[in-house]
Amino acid sequence: MEPAKSEDRACELYELNPATIPGHKTPQQPATKAPVKPKRTDKDKKPCNLRPSRVIIICVSKKISRRAALRKVTGGSVAIVTAGSLSHRLQAADEASAPALKGRIHHSVCRWCYGKIPLDELCRAAKQIGIQSLDLMEPPDFPTLRKHGLICAMVSGSPGGIGSGLNRTENHDRIVAFFEKTAPIVADYGYPNIICMSGNRNGMNDEQGLENCVIGAKRIAPIAEKYNVTAYIELLNSKRDHHDYMCDHSSWGVELCKRVGSEHFKLLFDIYHMQIMEGELIATIRENHQGRTGCRCCGCGGSWPSAASGGWPTRRPRHTTR
């Protein structure tokens, strides 16, 4: 049977929804029961081959690598076997797409940031990703570094640590003894630098501390010169991380290096610490870097050329010192 033809557009609308046509009367139709629609069973449902068996959406607030995304997606035990194979392929793809290093930036990391990782394991991982140096290491660790083809661009171990340094004359003999013992070992391994600290004020005024540091540094500098290494005294912030530390402003540190007057005693200008204390980093570096200052980026990444070639050492994660 052909469908009834509508006389006009209004009638068509009326047939669809009489309530939308004001004034129209619905034709009388014989009362009929609405057909009962049979309930669908599972047998009536047809599978859709285009529907994925599992959809996972990951929302992240920062950029992650494909391997990190894979680890999040394949959390279930069923997916582990497949994920392992896929992970190797993704890793190979990441390595193949990574740009070749040009050798102009010398990256390093600080051992104390990864203290829970065995040294051998840390060295292998560092070497694999292109790190060249593990900083703030001491002579007993040097053979392990050499085994993995790494260096220590900034050697630590000066007695007294951060809080008790050159600003106290009673500390000078043991600090000098440390340099006499350590400098030849550092030189034998071909490492360039040894770090030292001013110490905390503990009530001492800055001018007295400066004079004491000059006395101690003038005893250190000839030792460093003899073995062709450089002693660096580090600038640290006393506002947030190292309260009461004396060498906390670049002007104080630069004046110390001027009074010592040696190419083998320099100031380690830590960008992280001096941004907290002073700001105006670029202007300060331009004014003071010639022959007196080395720079490093604590927590910022990247580095400048070797200190031995007149450049500025830097550091990350936390330190890169070269």
Image (tube, rainbow, N blue to C red):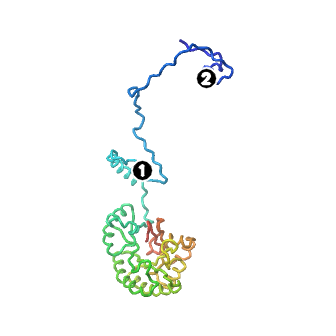
- Give the spatial CA distance, label 1 vs label 2: 52 Å
Which residue sits furthest right? 23
Could you tell me residue 282's position as x and y percent? 56, 70
Which residue sits furthest top? 1
Could you tell me residue 73's position as x and y percent? 40, 47
Tag 2 or tag 1, which sits nearer the N-term? 2
94 w.r.t. 15: above or below: below
Could you tell me residue 175's position as x and y percent? 40, 83
Mark 1 burial class by Cα count in 10 Å: few <14, some 14-19, many 20+: few
Q: Nearer the viewer, mark 1 or mark 2?
A: 2
- Residue of label 1: 69
Q: Amino acid at mark 1?
A: Ala
Quarter of the rendering occupied by the C terminus? bottom left
- Residue of label 2: 17
Which secondary structure, mark 2?
loop
| Residue 131 horizontal side relative to residue 253, left or right | left
48 w.r.t. 162: above or below: above
Question: What residue do we see at 44% from left, 87% from top?
Answer: 169
Question: What residue do we see at 51% from left, 75% from top?
Answer: 238
The image's mark for residue 296 is none
212 w.r.t. 1: above or below: below
Question: What residue do we see at 36% from left, 50% from top?
Answer: 87
Camera-side residue: 173 or 124?
173
Could you tell me residue 239's position as x and y percent? 52, 73
Q: Amino acid at mark 2?
A: Asn
Q: Mark 1 near mark 2, Cβ–Cβ under 8 Å?
A: no
Number of marks present in the image shown: 2
Which secondary structure, mark 1?
helix
